[in-house]
Image (tube, rainbow, N blue to C red):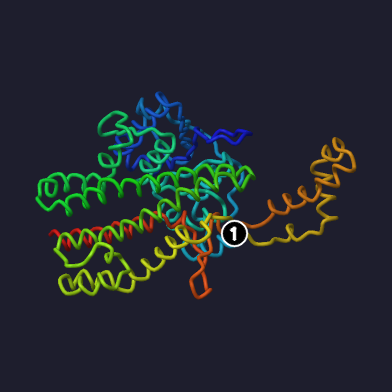
Amino acid sequence: MVKIAGNSVIKDFLFVLDPVSVVDVKDRFLREAVPPLIHLRENSGIATQLILPGYMSDISSLNDSRLMRLLNVISEGPPHVFDFDKMVSKRLRKKWGDFGDRKRELALLSLSESVAADGIVTDSKLLVEGQFDIYQYHRIRIVPIDEFPDLITVIAVGNSVYWSTEYNGDIGFDTFYQMTHWKAARLFKWWTHEIAKRDEKGLVENLRAALLNRFPYILYSRDMVRFYQLQRDYYMRNYRRQMYGSAIGYHINTFYLMLWGMLDHLTVIAKHARNMKIDERNCGIRRKAFWKEFKKIENSLYNYMNGRYINDWINIMADMRHQAAHNIIPMPSILVNETTDSKKSDDEVIDILKAEKPYLYKVFDSETIEALQPSWIADWRWKKMEIVAPGVIRITKPDGTGYMRDPVISVDYDLSNLMAVMDAFLVGLFN
């Protein structure tokens, strides 16, 4: 991203491309990634710069006029070798072995760090497997190359651009997900061809509301979480750690409220699909009355939903939903650990501030310095703390116990589980 001094939403992004990976999937990259990037640049003022380290691999096969409009090919990398945080080093050595044998991965990390990139686009198995550790401690995003088009969509949606490569145009928000998202599009076609003309009004309308409205809202909330995660990470790299936390909090809570609503909505759909003699008010993913009746007619689906994995996940979703709906709204916050520097005494920090920022002590009078100095000290200490997790919330259970969870990191995992549950219901009820 281009560095700015204000608080604006960043529109210019920067990614390091792994030349080995791009060469391997050139045709797909040209088909799925290049057209939307060109459209965003030329029509929406959203510029994404792609840095390609030509010194790492033979890139002659990438000589495509459209791609070259986006690439900044560099012939020399940064002189330093990437230095892992000790915690990351300890974890990755089990997977990587000797770091000295991982020249490709270290070169990509060094380049990304030196240019403060928004991510590394790669199919390196080692980087992909270590992406969460690397992100947690170094704020370097590893983007699997087959997920890069999705990230481009996130950037577009965050800027209210609903452009489709397939339809070669901006198709607007109202039908964007139903036409472009792989799952939403399939569900839309299924509802149109198999459900819309059926006579069961309650079933038809509930499926329409769940699949054509609620599910796209969930997808939109997820994209906006990802978009503001990009914004937050940019400012964190520039030592402003609290930017866009409220925006992330708003969309993450919307995501979990909508997700829980979908889980409940599936049980209403089941009622209509199986003509269950139960009131809709007694339908719900955790309603005992519903499951008691449903078990009699769909035992296999009942067993799936009450299996340990899905049941445990639903319990977590219940906690997320309950906090958002009834308690203090959970806002993801940075979790930090003290370091040797952050534990320095006030006098030690003051001496450092006088050396690092002498102008502060020349511009202000003694009374102003006395008033402002505590905030200077606190800010200096904060910047020296180790980030354990970029955005966690504490979930408090009714019995007073609780646990920590990062909902931003978990959003795609939870979306994947939701789609698995949706498939289980729809296949079980309509196959």
Image point (53%, 73%), residue name? 400
Residue 60 vs residue 431, the one in the foreground: 431
Counting from the top left corner in percent of width and height, residue 248 is at 50, 48
What is the total number of numbered labels drawn onto the structure image? Answer: 1
Looking at the rendering, which quadrant does residue 149 occupy?
Answer: top left
Q: Amino acid at mark 1?
A: Leu
Left or right: residue 108 versus residue 163 is right
Residue depicted at x 17% and y 63%: 428
Q: Nearer the viewer, residue 149 or 412?
A: 412
Q: Quadrant of the C terminus?
A: bottom left
Q: Dot 1: within a 10 Å radius of its alpha carbon, few (fewer than 14), some, or many (20 or more) residues? A: some
Nearest the camera: 240 or 264? 264
| Residue found 53% across the figure and 59% down from its top | 328
Give SS at disc 1.
strand
The residue lying at 17 percent from left, 70 percent from top is: 298
Name the side, left or right, on which 264 lies relative to 253.
Answer: left
- On the image, the x and y values in percent for residue 339 come to 70, 60
Q: Which residue is mark 1?
A: 335
- Give the side of residue 341 with respect to residue 74, left or right: right
Q: Position of residue 5 (x, y in %)?
A: 63, 34
Q: Looking at the rendering, which quadrant does residue 368 occupy? A: top right
Q: Looking at the image, which is closer to me, 153 or 366? A: 366
Across and down, in percent, residue 126 comes to 44, 56
